[in-house]
Amino acid sequence: MRLLIDGYNLMYAAGIVGPPGRGAGGLERSRAALIQFVASTLEVGDKSSAVVVFDAAGAPPGLPHTLFIDGVTIRFAKGYSDADELLEELIATNNTPRRLTVVSSDHRVQRAARRRKATAVDSDVWYDTALRKRTNRGTASLEDPSKPGAAVNDAEVEFWLRRLVGDDEAAPNSPWGDIFPPGYGDDVEDKDADD
């Protein structure tokens, strides 16, 4: 593992959260959008060394501990008091911590990373950098169509906007619908990033 991401921390820092009060499933859609962003932003060779960690307190029975989505590992902190505890364990057991980048604005997680000589990056800083790289790749592919890129077209933007605001009729058959049981995550509260 070379990239470790505090999932909810990044999701809130990036603003990948639908409006409150839009019904059940809003958090699942936000998680799915974040996972899609991470997977589409990373280079193909970097995906297999990336892990995104989410809290799982109060998760419904049957939720797996680990998922693999588009080459990225998704971990749920089942059996841990919170995601920070799992993040700290993953940092402590990493075999090459000097090559590890930890994405979180949480000071507790950043301290754990620095103790192991890993690189700690605030979530908003990582998101801005990743977005800029993704945009530059897309621009480069427009300039030279022979180079693949991650340019986002208007239809994709419209799709994700509808998904985030909860318009299920506009974006049916979510590819993430079978991953998270209905109502999963509705009990998760917005935590201050500096906890």
Image (tube, grey):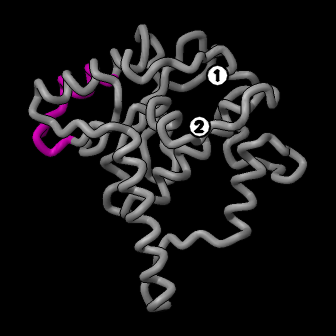
Vertical comparison of 145 with 61: above or below: below
Q: Nearer the viewer, residue 46 or 106?
A: 106
Q: Position of residue 3 (x, y in %)?
A: 29, 44
Q: Is residue 98 magenta?
A: yes
Badge number at residue 175: none
Residue in the image at 33% along x and 15% along y: 85
Single out the residue that lies furthest toward the right. Answer: 169
User: Are discs 1 and 2 less than 8 Å apart at CB?
Assistant: yes
Q: Does the magenta stretch include residue 21?
A: no
Mark 1 crowdedness (10 Å alpha carbons): few <14, some 14-19, many ≥20:
many
Three-letter amino acid code of the residue under disc 1: Gly
Badge number at residue 31: 2
Residue in the image at 56% along x and 40% along y: 15
Q: Nearer the viewer, residue 56 or 67?
A: 56
Write down the residue under mark 1. Answer: 185
What's drawn in magenta, residue-wise? 87-100
Give the image quarter of residue 24. top right
Three-letter amino acid code of the residue under disc 2: Arg
Q: In this view, does 169 lie to the left or right of 130?
A: right
Q: Is the magenta stretch mostly helix, strand or loop?
A: helix
